[in-house]
Image (cartoon, rainbow, N blue to C red):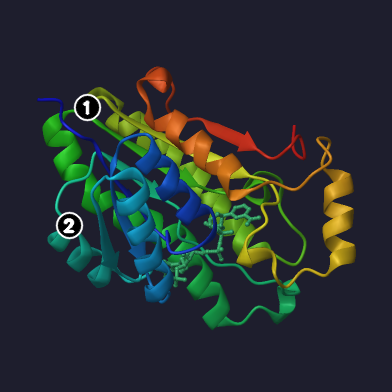
Amino acid sequence: MVKIARVLITGASRGIGAATALAFAEAGYSVVINYNKSEERAKALRDKIESVYKTSCILAQADVSDPDSVREMFSQIGEVDVLVNNAGCSTQRLFTDITDEEWNRTISTDLGGVFYCSRAALPAMIRKKSGVIINISSMWGEVGASCEVHYSAAKAGVIGLTKALAKEVAPSDIRVNCIAPGVIMTDMMQSFDSETLSALTEETPLGRLGTPEDIASAAVFLASDKASFITGQVLGVNGGFVI
Ligand code: NAP
């Protein structure tokens, strides 16, 4: 019997995470949807996955910024073959206006969450000598964004974590890669006015903003055997914004 691979996607109730859950379901994976606050949206996504793709899908509530919450989630869900560390938050603020609370929330969610979830998923992967971790960083982690220093710092940290961890676990045949999205139309972009969005579109060589599906298909590729010689890399999915 062919074993069905199991993927956990953090922050999968909305946006890029939700599209990624759908894409993995379409590719035949059994899906675990992590959410924090958006329970109704997570339930609706699970129902869609079960009815459209007829694959197993379960929900796992956890705040990825909280190590105890992540431990509790993994004790409930058990082993996964693929982990997509997608959960994240961002705010726009002048550097001198960033509060301690905002700094700590951004670092503990966008970077800490990657650490806590990877640490929880890896022992089983190391035992099985197989597994894939995909971290969702940002092009701002590569080049820095004005008024998003806290976010850029967290996302740059994700890139460093990806490269170092890839080296450490490669002998166990575990691959760790990173996707650095450009501007993707999700709730995260809601605070941007239409003028800013037009300027960002103009700055994108391919002449459009990204969709959650653009990131989802890259994640499914990186998890697949077609990417079996790719580890420690940062895949820019940004329409050419950063080259
Ligand atoms: P989004 O639409 O705002 O969705 C964020 C998701 O993260 C939600 O499912 C939310 O869950 C979850 N989340 C937030 N804090 C969490 C926590 N503490 N614990 C667990 N889940 C948490 O954002 P998005 O645009 O899809 O972004 C997804 C990822 O892509 C993020 O890491 C983001 O930084 C990155 N990214 C986005 C863009 C972009 O332009 N949109 C660009 C580059 C990188 P609940 O609603 O259930 O709380």
Residue 96 falls in image quadrant: bottom right
- Where is residue 195? Give x, y as percent: 90, 64
The image position of residue 77, as x and y in percent, is 17, 57
The residue sitting at 61% across, 82% down in the picture is 99
Q: Quadrant of the N terminus?
A: top left
- Residue under numbered circle 1: 172
**Mark 1–mark 2 distance (CA, rounded to whole Å):** 22 Å
Q: Which residue is mark 2?
A: 77
- Pair 1/2: label in front: 2
Asked if marks 1 and 2 touch (Cβ < 8 Å), the reply is no
Residue 64, visible in the rendered structure:
no
In this rendering, would 92 be left or right of 72?
Answer: right
Q: Residue at x 35, y 54 (%)?
A: 115
Image mark for residue 164:
none
What residue do we see at 33% from left, 60% from top? Answer: 47
Q: Residue 72, percent across and down?
A: 18, 68
Give the amino acid type for the residue marked by disc 2 in the picture.
Answer: Ile
Q: Is residue 32 left or right of residue 147?
A: left
Residue at image location 54% in from the left, 67% down from the top: 89
Q: Dividing the picture into quarters, in which one does residue 222 lie?
A: top left
Measured as percent of width and height from the top left, residue 28 is found at 31, 35
61 lies left or right of 18: left
